[in-house]
Image (cartoon, rainbow, N blue to C red):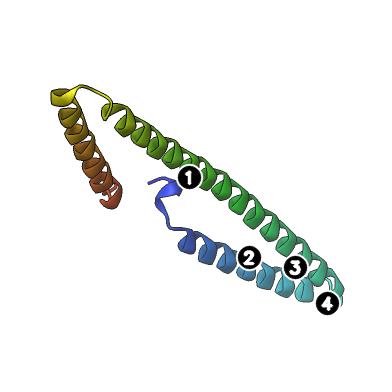
Amino acid sequence: MQFADYSLAFIFLASVVVLVASSEVGRRYCRLEHRQGREDVSTVEASILGLLALMIGFTFALSLARFEARREAVLREANAIGTTALRARMLPAPHNTQCLTLLKEYVRLRLDVTRHDPEPSE
């Protein structure tokens, strides 16, 4: 099983649990070994939260880039379909209806594919 197979919510919750547990272990270790105040632990907590914020920022940046690329691809395909339909109308009589029928069938199939949620095996 790969990292991409897990949901984002599960990864987030697992990260929070690991960070809180490691912070608690570090706090207890500090109390037992060094008998120092809370200042050292708060520094570690701040650095951990800073790293978490950095990871979340990178995650959002990557997902935004993928979203923009997908949106641009959908827009290009829609423009290509529209251009093809306009050019098909300029064909002679028997061919333009066939071409438009095929184009409508393609659009129907394309919509069916995008609405279908594929299984991981697919």
Q: Secondary structure at mark 1?
A: helix
**Reading the chain from its start, which is encountered first: label 3 or label 4?**
4
Q: Residue at x 70, y 55 (%)?
A: 54
* Residue that label 1 marks: 71
Q: Is residue 73 left or right of residue 61?
A: left
Q: Is residue 72 left or right of residue 18?
A: left
Query: Circle 4 sits in a helix, a strand or a loop, which is it?
Result: loop
Cα distance in 3D space between marks 3 and 4: 11 Å
Mark 1 to mark 4: distance in Å? 49 Å
- Numbered label attached to residue 19: 2
Residue type, numbered disc 1: Arg
| Residue 85 occupies quadrant | top left
Identify the amino acid type marked 2: Leu
Work out whether residue 92 or residue 118 is closer to the camera in this orientation and state it.
92
Q: Which residue is mark 3?
A: 45
- Which label sits in the foreground, 3 or 1? 1
Distance of mark 2 from mark 1, alpha carbons?
35 Å
Distance of mark 4 from mark 2, alpha carbons?
Answer: 17 Å
Q: Nearer the viewer, residue 46 or 80?
A: 80
Reading the chain from its start, which is encountered first: label 4 or label 2? 2
**Disc number lying in front (3 or 4):** 3
Bin the neighbour count of mark 2 within 10 Å (Cα to Cα): few under 14, some 14-19, many 20 and up.
some
Residue 118 in picture, x, y percent from top left: 27, 48
Is residue 91 shown above or below 53? above
Q: CA distance from mark 3 to mark 1?
A: 38 Å
In 3D space, how far apart are the residues under numbered discs 2 and 3 (Cα atoms)? 9 Å
Hey, which residue is sitting farthest left in the picture? 94
Discs 1/4, front: 1
